[in-house]
Image (cartoon, rainbow, N blue to C red):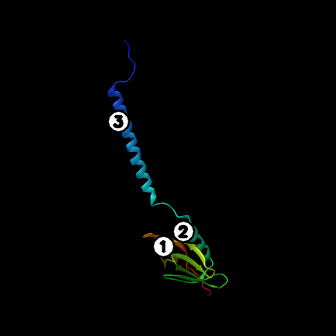
């Protein structure tokens, strides 16, 4: 008499191996998801920083602190301020980015850095240079 099929031990062993693989894959997925969670780039913030950097290319008479004040190529006084949790470029009320908790502008080594706090996380960007050509 020839019987075809699997024994109970073989079936239980294959179920055990399959369940171990499924459990390990779920842990691996969670680990990979949360390790990349903090590294997501906010495109709106990056675009706002790029817009501000373009404005500062031709700027002069730059002053920085909690706000950034400069004169553009038309010699108009411009200012970047934090207003209602938005980073705003005046005149014209151009909103650079939203949901900003705090902002600081610092200088050093002829570079202007902008530090932004969003959701209790600080990010630092180099937005321009305060180098000016001296007329002698």
Q: Nearer the viewer, mark 2 or mark 3?
A: 3
Q: Which residue is mark 3?
A: 16
Q: Find residue 99 and report its horizontal and vertical position in percent.
A: 51, 71
Circle 2: element type? helix
Residue at 36% from the left image edge and 29% from the top image edge: 11
Image: 36 above or below 124? above
Q: Extreme top residue here?
A: 1
Residue at 54% from the left image edge and 76% from the top image edge: 87
Q: Find residue 94 and report its horizontal and vertical position in percent.
A: 61, 76
Q: Nearer the viewer, mark 1 or mark 3?
A: 3
Circle 3: element type? helix
Image: 59 above or below 42? below
Asked if labels 3 and 2 touch by Cβ distance under 8 angstroms, the answer is no
- Looking at the rendered image, the quarter that the N terminus falls into is top left
Circle 1: element type? strand
Q: Which residue is mark 2?
A: 45
Q: Which mark is residue 116?
A: 1
- Looking at the rendered image, the quarter that the C terminus falls into is bottom right
Q: Find residue 15 and report its horizontal and vertical position in percent.
A: 37, 34
Choose the circle earlier in sequence order: 2 or 3. 3
- Are there few (<14), some (14-19), or many (20+) residues within 10 Å of tag 1? many
Residue 103 versus residue 75: which sits nearer the camera?
Answer: 103
Q: Extreme right residue here?
A: 74
Q: Find residue 107 and report its horizontal and vertical position in percent.
A: 49, 79
User: Mark 2 and mark 3: span between their CA atoms?
Assistant: 48 Å
Residue at 57% from the left image edge and 78% from the top image edge: 88
Q: Is residue 20 left or right of residue 63?
A: left
Q: For residue 49, what is the image quadrant?
A: bottom right
Asked if labels 1 and 2 touch by Cβ distance under 8 angstroms, the answer is yes
Residue 103 versus residue 9: which sits nearer the camera?
Answer: 9
């Amino acid at each position: 008499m020839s019987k075809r099929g699997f024994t109970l031990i073989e079936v239980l062993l294959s179920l055990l191996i399959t369940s171990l693989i499924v459990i390990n894959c779920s842990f691996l997925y969670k680990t990979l998801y949360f390790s990349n969670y903090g590294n997501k780039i906010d495109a709106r913030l990056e675009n706002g920083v790029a817009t501000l950097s373009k404005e500062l290319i031709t700027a002069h008479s730059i002053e920085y602190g909690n706000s950034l004040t400069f004169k553009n190529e038309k010699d108009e006084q411009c200012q970047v301020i934090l207003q209602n949790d938005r980073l705003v470029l005046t005149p014209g009320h151009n909103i650079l980015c939203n949901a900003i908790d705090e902002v600081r502008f610092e200088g050093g080594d002829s570079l202007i850095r902008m530090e932004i706090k969003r959701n209790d996380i600080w990010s630092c960007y180099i937005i321009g240079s305060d180098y000016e050509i001296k007329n002698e």
